[in-house]
Image (spheres, helix red, strand yellow):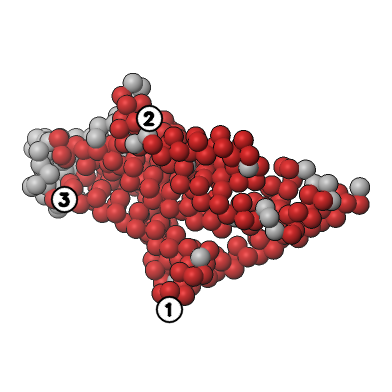
Amino acid sequence: MSGYSLDVDTAKDRLRSEFGRSRRVLGHVLEDNAAKVGVAIILAFGFLGLFGPYIAPYHPIEDTLQQSGSMMRLQEPGGKAVLGTTSFGKDVLSQFLAGARPTLIVGLFGGVGTGVLGFLVGLTSGYFGGRVDEFLMRLTDLTFALPFLPMALVILSFVTPSVWLITAVLVVFLWKMPARVIRSEVMTVKERTFVKSARARGAGHMRTMFLHVAPNVLGIGFLYTAYAVGWSIVAGASLAFLGFGDPTTTSWGRMLQQVFRSGAIRVAWWWVLPPAIGIGAITTAVFLVGRAFEEIVNPDLQTEQE
């Protein structure tokens, strides 16, 4: 019983240490100028994702009409249409604001889902080794062998795409990279003295894995989760551009698909730039924050830059 109490106390101490380290890491990341820009952009787009549909001047599929009652098609920015209109007479600003939410939902939940699944697979594979490791790594190899875009298109062609289904498809195909990296880290951590001591005191596999090993690889997990958010945003927009997005919602990828299909992509710059800039800006912001975090997780990278 005393061994159990000692094990729990040790685990609590390590968790407190890791949480304290996480706070210091966050403080260091926020000292990085590029990361500050990234955080500001993420917060700005997060605001648009939450409140964009409510502050949009028009409904995204509502026709924008002139005073005469005629539809404003391919109207350049100005007047009633601040960012112009589409060839279908829709307000570009309203579509951009409404499109922020589904785009960010796919990115956020796709990235977090990818990070969590990859973390759990890598943690389990690296800790248990043997047949468990063999099975999970062969499964990982299989996902590496399957090309993401063609397989995603095949799956989505048999069902009606939705934001959540697209998110699930992204998670299924993107978890492989963080899983491999986490596995390598876990195989190193599990050989350390404090892990072997926990096992010697009678700690079970689950307690050892989650309370002693997992906290020491959380940094890598958070790093790849941040990058996975960026990958998911780009991948989700790519699927929407190819016509496999959610047909019931307006997203930035779907805006680009509509301008391309209308044939106005070379002339309606005001229709192309907002979604393109939005996708580029939020993806860049995520990678700026991830880059600053990577310098903490990988001190050698910071040394090389200096």
Which residue is painted at 9% across and 35% down in the image?
Answer: 70
Please state the horizontal and vertical placement of residue 131, each as a whole percent of the image: 62, 35
Instruction: Report the disc number at residue 270.
Output: 3
Task: Residue type at mark 1: give it.
Answer: Glu
Instruction: Report the disc number at residue 162.
Output: 2
Q: Nearer the viewer, residue 178 or 23?
A: 178
Classed neighbour count for the residue bearing mark 2: other residues with Cα under 10 Å, few (<14), some (14–19), many (≥20): some
Classed neighbour count for the residue bearing mark 3: other residues with Cα under 10 Å, few (<14), some (14–19), many (≥20): many
State which tag comes first along the sequence, 3 or 2. Answer: 2
Task: Residue type at mark 3: give it.
Answer: Trp
Q: Residue furthest top?
A: 158
Classed neighbour count for the residue bearing mark 1: other residues with Cα under 10 Å, few (<14), some (14–19), many (≥20): few
Residue at which label 1 appears: 306
Regarding residue 163, the answer to whether it shows in the image is: no
- In this picture, residue 59 sits left or right of residue 24: left
Q: Nearer the viewer, residue 215 or 89?
A: 215
State which tag comes first along the sequence, 3 or 1. Answer: 3
Circle 3 SS class: helix
